[in-house]
Amino acid sequence: MTAQQVPLWSPSPERVEGALISEFCRQISKRTGQSIEGYPALHRWSVENSADFWDTVWEFCGVIASNRGEQVIVDADKLPGARFYPDARLNFAENLLRYRDDGVAMMFRDEHGRVSNLTRNELYERVAALSSALRDAGLAPGDRVAAFMPNIPETVIAMLACVAAGGVFSSCSPDFGVGGVLDRFGQIEPRFLFAVDAYYYNGKTHDSLAKLRDIAAALPSLKAVVVTTFVDGDADISTIERAVTLESFVAGHQQAELEFEQLPFNHPLYIMYSSGTTGVPKCIVHGAGGTLLKHLVEHQLHCNVLPATRLFYFTTCGWMMWNWLVSGLASGATLMLYDGSPFYPNGNVLFDYAQDQKIEIFGTSAKYIDACAKAEIQPAVTHRLDALKSILSTGSPLSPEAFDYIYASVKTDVCLSSIAGGTDIISCFVCGCPALPVYRGEIQVSALALDVQALGEDGEILEAGEKGELCCMNSFPAMPIGFWNDDDGGRYRAAYFERFPGIWCHGDYVARTEHDGWIIYGRSDAVLNPGGVRIGTAEIYRQAEKVDAVLESLVIGQQWDNDVRVVLFVRLKDGHVLDDALIAEIRDKIRRNATPRHVPSKIIQVADIPRTKSGKIVELAVRKIVHGEEVKNREALANPEALDLFVNLPDLK
């Protein structure tokens, strides 16, 4: 075995034997008479026997439905166009609220360290009251309900109450500006809007009511604006059109019975939004049944979520990981919610939460892990994380050095699962497996029942180590049911199926590894092409950010002399200046550890790097600015003012 082939972590035989995925394999063997042993065999069987796989998942996970129907997939070979469970009738919220006891459904912690619990019985009763109030106020199946909310229990309750009645839920976080909210909610014409009076972030209180006033006035479709008084119990909402407090809205409904509207498998559940950094966001519609089945697979088989597992993901309500997290209720998980800055009052706050509340699955972004490494945070020394079994990372590629950091500085005995997919499928194409080893810098596996391949320029399937487009060759139930207001499906087909007809092309630049894992090199539309050679941006970030002075970086290809030149922007640690010596160090690091073609022609210091609300850097928006083009939807960014740093840079002329 070479050094590169030695896993950073391997599960014990007891852990493998006790994993839900092992139990699932045994169930398939009983059901089919076939011996399924190990993940490669299971994945192969799941792709070759898609209908049997999803039907086994339905039984194994105990999906609740008033009707299942005989057919599992109709037109399975049509992409897009395949239909799953065409005769099924179910309710998403009913599946998430299946447990009724005094176990903890949700735990919430805020920036000030205050912790509160909500039992499963209490959650059920609060959803029942709110759902009854929504029905009484006129909510009908198919109506949209929007939330301009932080990641607090009331947001989960609003979603479940909406969906129980057949509504369609959509959310964004309260740090969005008015324009960004209206770019999203204005397209879907919600009937109800949930919001808070204010929220906390980085030690400060941020008012929401001023923005809410303008938002409500611009949404004539609204019947009511329901305000949770999260910060100030005496907040004045009288100037907001159609506004009512949550307490007043549910008054008289506390004893209501919870009714679950039985709806088709593909009834709209969520409307999600593309990042919107290069135009008005696309409204991506996801169906209830497909979202439920795919999340059950990912939670139980890919993450080993058991009843009462303490499941945490650091997310806002504007990122699909919030929707993914909330689905953990269907597997009996205890949701661990947190709202606020992950670095207030210091960089240990999330690890404090993990230690104090015995979090077992800890999810976050690759950028957060990088920031912890740069800040030299050492939870392995400062904390007791005995309960922690898995760490999940997504949002951008997780570098090999970040793998090293986790095992050296956080915990040695943990399954580190880098996962990737996105808003487009509200789930993962490639993800983790608690019964397999973790290799440095690699995503462990292709998701079950998804035939994921790297395709070359002409659509050929590439061998391990060859870089190409991440594509899915077969249908799966979590594919979107369409885009909002795209009646003929033209925009939907153009987004994913135009490059390779009949194949989902996701837009990630990837390579399969010798272990059947994956490495993601960045977004395909951000891939650099100097001299006609394709270079993934992640390859440059990895090397540049190894340099101690560099906090983070962003790279683009600039049109120059009928070719493309590589331009690297760096944000440095306080007290550092980009002088000739540092430029030489960065270039040398990239040249020695990548190739000479990766070396930037220009390296420029900037005070900030623009990013989306979920922390993704926006290479395309910066490329537009550098080329003198307009970025139309700046409100999609967490820090839109950072774009101004890239306007008319003298070093790029």
Image: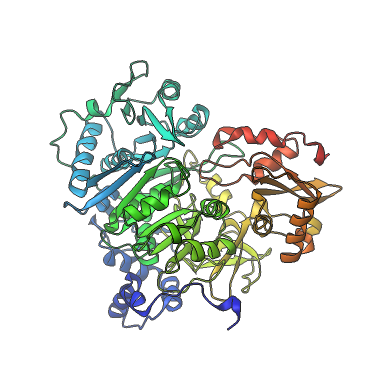
Quarter of the image holding residue 161?
top left
When the figure is inspected, residue 112 is found, relative to residue 328, above or below; the finding is above
The x, y position of residue 512, in whole percent, is 58, 70
Quarter of the image holding residue 6?
bottom right
Q: Is residue 496 left or right of residue 605?
A: left
When the figure is inspected, residue 28 is found, relative to residue 347, above or below; the finding is below
Give the position of the C terminus as an image quadrant: top right
The x, y position of residue 484, in whole percent, is 46, 40
Q: Is residue 97 visible?
A: no
Q: Is residue 261 left or right of residue 643?
A: left
Colouring: rainbow
Q: Is residue 500 left or right of residue 42?
A: right
The x, y position of residue 51, in whole percent, is 37, 68
Quarter of the image holding residue 250?
top left
Along the viewing direction, whichever of 301 and 583 lies nearer the viewer: 583
Q: Residue at x 75, y 45 (%)?
A: 578
The x, y position of residue 155, in whole percent, is 33, 39
Along the viewing direction, whichever of 447 and 440 lies nearer the viewer: 440
Q: Is residue 626 visible?
A: yes
Q: Is residue 566 left or right of residue 50?
A: right
Give the position of the N terminus as an image quadrant: bottom right
Q: Residue at x 34, y 56 (%)?
A: 359
> Residue extending furthest top?
239
Along the viewing direction, whichever of 110 and 129 lies nearer the viewer: 110
